[in-house]
Image (cartoon, rainbow, N blue to C red):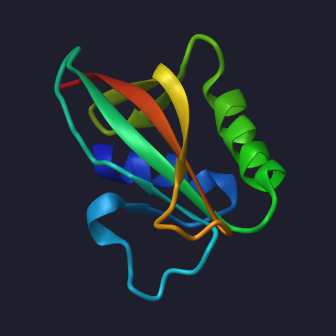
Amino acid sequence: MTKTEALYNYFNSFNIPAYPTSSVPEQAKFPYMTYEVALGEWQDTTAIAVNVYYYTDSEAVINNKVEEISASIGLGGTQIACDSGSIWITKGSPYVNAIRYDDEPTIKRRQLNLNLTFFTL
């Protein structure tokens, strides 16, 4: 599995669709996530943003999804396998920002800042 496929599989493991930021379908329905695809080689570290979107009046729903993602990463990060090695995913700083979405109070957005360290050839 390529690095891009490994990232796709990881971000789509949270029971809502996840799309590369550059490839969100026009017909995408809430909830969904977007993630940046920034690739590196041996010990390169890249910072990416992951955005989680929900159409809801409840802050709890989106916060629960962020907590699920946080638990998956853990305190020390998580590694995902790919053809040429692995990618270590860790939390950036700040880890989460709550962002208002285009003057629409029922669309909730959270931006997660992550670091990807590549142990790949």
Q: Of 43 and 86, which appears nearest the observer?
A: 43
* Residue 30: % across, % down: 62, 74
* Residue 44: % across, % down: 20, 19
**Residue at the front extreme of this rendering:** 103
Q: Of 78 and 101, which appears nearest the observer?
A: 101
**Residue at the bottom extreme of this rendering:** 27
Q: Viewed as shown, does residue 113 lie left or right of 70?
A: left
111 lies above or below 114:
below
7 lies above or below 72:
below
* Residue 12: % across, % down: 55, 57
Identified at 23% across, 41% down, the residue is 38
Tell how many labels: 0
Q: In the picture, residue 77 is in which quadrant?
A: top right
Identified at 64% across, 66% down, the residue is 105
Q: Viewed as shown, does residue 82 lie left or right of 79?
A: left
Q: Viewed as shown, does residue 81 lie left or right of 107?
A: left
Note whether residue 2 is visible: no
Note whether residue 3 is visible: yes
Question: Which quadrant holds the C terminus?
Answer: top left
Q: In the picture, residue 31 is in which quadrant?
A: bottom right
* Residue 13: % across, % down: 62, 52
Q: In the picture, residue 64 is in which quadrant?
A: top right
79 lies above or below 35:
above
Identified at 29% across, 24% down, the residue is 118
